[in-house]
Amino acid sequence: MGLSTTLTVNGVSSTIALDDPRITLLDLLRERLHLTGTKKGCDRGQCGACTIIVDGRRVNSCLALAISHDGADILTIEGVAHGNRLHPVQEAFIAHDGLQCGFCTPGQIMSAIGLMQEGQAGDDPERIREGMSGNLCRCGAYQGITEAVLEAQKILDAASRKEVA
Amino acid sequence: MKTFDYVRPATVREAVAAASAPGAAYLAAGTNLMDLMKGNIVGPSRLVDISHVPDLDQIEDLPNGGVRIGALVRNADLAHDRNFARRFPAIAEALLSGASAQLRNAATVGGNLLQRTRCAYFYDVASACNKREPGSGCDARGGDNRLHAIVGWSESCIATHPSDFCIPLVALDAVVEVEGAAGRREVPLEMFHRLPGNAPDRESALGPGEMIVAVRLPAEAAHFAAHARYLKVRERTSYAFAVVSAAAALRMDGDTIREARLALGGVALKPWRVRDAERILAGARAGAPAFRRAAETALAEAKPSGDNGYKIELARRIVSRALALAAAGTPERVPALPASPFATASGDAFHA
């Protein structure tokens, strides 16, 4: 059977032939589309390094079969900046030392963007920590990560207030 | 991972036909199945992907006052559905205490019921496990079994069912709608999961090819909304399975408990409803003495299956505390740390 999946990745739509039904979205992004920003940490849904946004929701790409996600709209770390202008969450991670080695960072940033879109945490650090608990950081940059998400939330709130006004 | 045929049915009927073949398995989000397949714990020869079957992702209010939750409703969508969370707050709290935000965004209602145990010996293909390989033995017996079952276990298997969602569901008389080749039938959730006995590989009431299409709650389940909580002890604050958990729901008249619902998680191979304890609470004055009596009754049959005797007293205390929290009243919003013993009613944390 000739398997294929049609995906929109960072705004670009393409149909990709799959030679094996076992390919996950993570492996497809990294090995076929050469978008290696999304990291393979545990490959078992435990660490969050592979977090991407699928149809507006943050998920673990290591547990998602590519063949099952035919028609999906995907956002990866490569798609969040506007040209040379970083996404406010990226800027906040730099400003608040939200990383050390950086391996978990793309997953942390995609998860933070997803968290803010979900709108459940607001400016409560405890809700942010809880909402980010699916992303492990073995360097232990959690304090900086929480501060970065708080800061990014503040910036985006101010921007949306300006838009309304 | 063993390779498989991939089938994408368009209807429930097609799905059931495709999944009735030996070696077939249903795929929804795959958050548990992919993990098990990657570890070669299971190796289905055919995956029947039901994630594109329409109409299984609805939350419907029923004319009789109950609610019907489609099998493909995502955990996060159910927990954040305002109407649902207002009527069934302990279920929303249990859902939000489970897994991570990423997993809750993907994982489905049907998949939650059918998730496999997290027993490390089930996951380790080099270990003996009667559930994974019938007749091979149980290395959890005499192994690292601090987290294993304290009720309903057998010499064949001492694993636990890991679901949080199922605990308030079983307390609130949830019913599972199942479809198979012979048509549709209903199974009370309390009868859905099987205790291990001498056949721990047989886990649920599902026959070959049968699939869960929905979970239903009766109208009475919403009568507990003002006094319903879920409480869960974990080995870390968030993103961990329950060591022990409890769902407590009360119908109160002043200080008097009119009706109580109580179920435990992390203690058995199924969500563990404790009706004897519920009967003790009915008509009692809410307070520590009644809660402790209920807790003693709830764990009366418990016995350690290994180095886990501590879980019995822990479970009693979690039951007492879940009842006290329920009696105090459901908070306006699920606390910042859902179901956490470290959270106060206001959502503030005790720890830094």
Image (cartoon, rainbow, N blue to C red):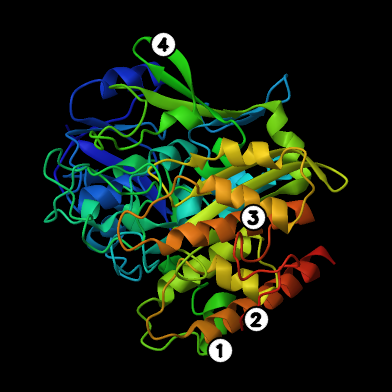
Q: Is residue A98 left or right of residue B283?
A: left
Residue A151 is tagged as 2
Residue at image location 58% in from the left, 58% down from the top: B318
Q: Tell me whether marks 2 and 4 sit on the same chain.
A: no
User: Is A71 displayed left or right of B139 in the figure?
Assistant: right
| Marks 1 and 2, the one that precedes in the sequence | 1
Disc 4 residue type (three-letter): Gly
According to the image, label 1 marks what residue? A96
**Inter-mark Cα distance, 2 to 4:** 54 Å
Q: Are marks 3 and 2 on the same chain?
A: no
Front-most of B244 and A104? Answer: B244
- Residue mark closest to the camera, 2 vs 4: 4
Give amino acid for label 1. His
The residue beneath circle 3 is B292
For label 1, the crowd category at 10 Å Cα-Cα, with few meaning under 14, some 14 to 19 and many 20 or more, is some
Q: Provide the residue designation for mark 4.
A: B183
Viewer-nearest residue: B180 or A102: B180
Q: Quadrant of residue A152?
A: bottom right
Is there CB contact under 8 Å for labels 1 and 3?
Answer: no
Mark-to-mark CA distance, 1 and 3: 48 Å
Left or right of residue B15: residue B294: right
Q: Amino acid at mark 3?
A: Arg
Along the line of sight, which residue is nearer the eye, A89 or A162?
A89
User: Mark 3 and mark 2: span between their CA atoms?
Assistant: 46 Å
Residue B343 location in percent, x, y?
65, 69
- Tell me whether the residue at label 1 lies in contact with that at label 2, contact meaning CB atoms closer than 8 angstroms: yes
Give the Cα separation between the discs numbered 4 and 1: 58 Å
Of the image marks 4 and 3, the number of the one nearer the N terminus: 4
Question: Are dots 4 and 3 on a single chain?
Answer: yes
Q: Residue at x 36, y 33 (%)?
A: B194
Image position of B274 (left or right of A108): right
The image position of residue A126, as x and y in percent, is 63, 73
